[in-house]
Image (cartoon, grey):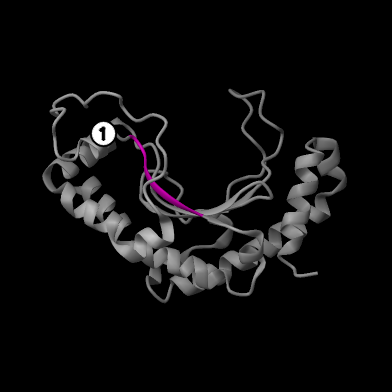
């Protein structure tokens, strides 16, 4: 069996048997799947380090979240997540690349998800000043072919943000509260020998988009 297929095999079994009792008796299978994923992350980090040396300083274990769900405020959630991820930044307040692997839905994403009020204010100011540049990035053919348009934003304002006119040329962007893009990936792609190549391409496609967002947050 292709080693990476064991990740899907384990996560599928976990989703069907989501309990501490089951996990306690399958701890070895979890550790095996986790180790396989960490090895894949190391290969991704090594590849990304050829573009940005800071990735060489990141440990794979520092890019993943605990498999346990936080049920303190959400007791209805399953005990365990049914996915593995890769996120080389823990604050959630910096544009980055994110990889999500699950039997239900695997994808590669980037950008900034639901920034806080102050960050959102900074983004809107940047769009007000130079939203055309963001549109140029989003509409660049290679980027759009790979990721498509911005992800759906269920929290998007129905009216104009305070201080902005309804006929602002970039009002659709200004109404947004989520600035992410996503590309679905198949199980075949994830388990192939070329998944690192796909993640590298996603990273390179994301560079102008994430750079725009990053600059908007720091000005």
- The part of the chain drawn in magenta is 177-183
Q: Is residue 206 visible?
A: no
In this figure, what is the number of numbered marks? Answer: 1
Residue 16 figure quarter = top right
Q: Is residue 195 left or right of residue 113?
A: right
Q: Nearer the viewer, residue 112 or 67?
A: 112
- How far across and down, in percent of the image, does residue 146 sit? 42, 61
Q: Mark 1 points at which residue?
A: 118
- How far across and down, in percent of the image, does residue 22 sit? 85, 40
Q: Residue 32 lies in magenta, yes or no?
A: no
Q: Which of 170 and 71 is in front in this view?
A: 170
In the figure, 115 relative to 31: above or below? above
In the figure, 43 relative to 75: above or below? below
- Badge 1 crowding class, 10 Å Cα cut-off, few under 14, some 14 to 19, many 20 or more, is few
Q: Is residue 56 left or right of residue 74?
A: left
Q: Which residue is drawn at 17% across and 44% down?
A: 126
Q: Which residue is drawn at 40% across and 62% down?
A: 145
Q: Can residue 128 be seen in this view?
A: yes
Residue 42 figure quarter = bottom right
Secondary structure of the magenta portion, mostly? Answer: strand
- How far across and down, in percent of the image, does residue 123 sit? 23, 41
Q: Residue 179 lies in magenta, yes or no?
A: yes
Q: Please, what secondary structure does the residue beneath circle 1 have?
A: helix
Q: Quadrant of the N terminus?
A: bottom right
Q: Which residue is drawn at 41% across and 64% down?
A: 203
- How far across and down, in percent of the image, does residue 58 sit? 48, 63
Q: In this view, does 87 lie to the left or right of 72?
A: left
In the figure, 157 relative to 2: above or below? above
Q: Nearer the viewer, residue 10 or 138?
A: 138
Q: Which residue is drawn at 88% across and 45% down?
A: 25
């Amino acid at each position: 069996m292709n080693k990476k297929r064991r990740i899907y095999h384990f996560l599928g079994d976990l989703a069907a048997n989501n309990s501490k009792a089951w996990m306690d008796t399958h701890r070895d299978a979890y550790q095996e799947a986790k180790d396989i994923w960490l090895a894949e992350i190391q290969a991704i980090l090594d590849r990304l380090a050829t573009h940005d040396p800071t990735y060489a300083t990141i440990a794979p274990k520092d890019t993943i979240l605990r498999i346990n769900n936080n049920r303190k405020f959400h007791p209805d959630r399953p005990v365990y997540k049914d996915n593995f991820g890769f996120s080389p930044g823990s604050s959630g307040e910096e544009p980055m690349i994110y990889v999500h692997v699950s039997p239900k839905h695997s994808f590669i994403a980037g950008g900034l998800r639901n920034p806080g009020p102050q960050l959102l204010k900074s983004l809107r100011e940047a769009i007000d000043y130079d939203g055309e540049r963001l549109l140029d990035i989003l509409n660049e053919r290679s980027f759009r072919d790979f990721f498509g348009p911005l992800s759906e934003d269920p929290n998007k304002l129905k009216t104009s943000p305070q201080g902005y006119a309804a006929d602002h040329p970039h009002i659709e962007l200004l109404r947004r509260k989520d600035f992410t893009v996503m590309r679905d990936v198949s199980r075949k792609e994830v388990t192939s020998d070329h998944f690192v190549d796909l993640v590298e391409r996603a990273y390179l496609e994301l560079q102008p988009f994430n750079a725009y967002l990053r600059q908007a947050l720091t000005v």
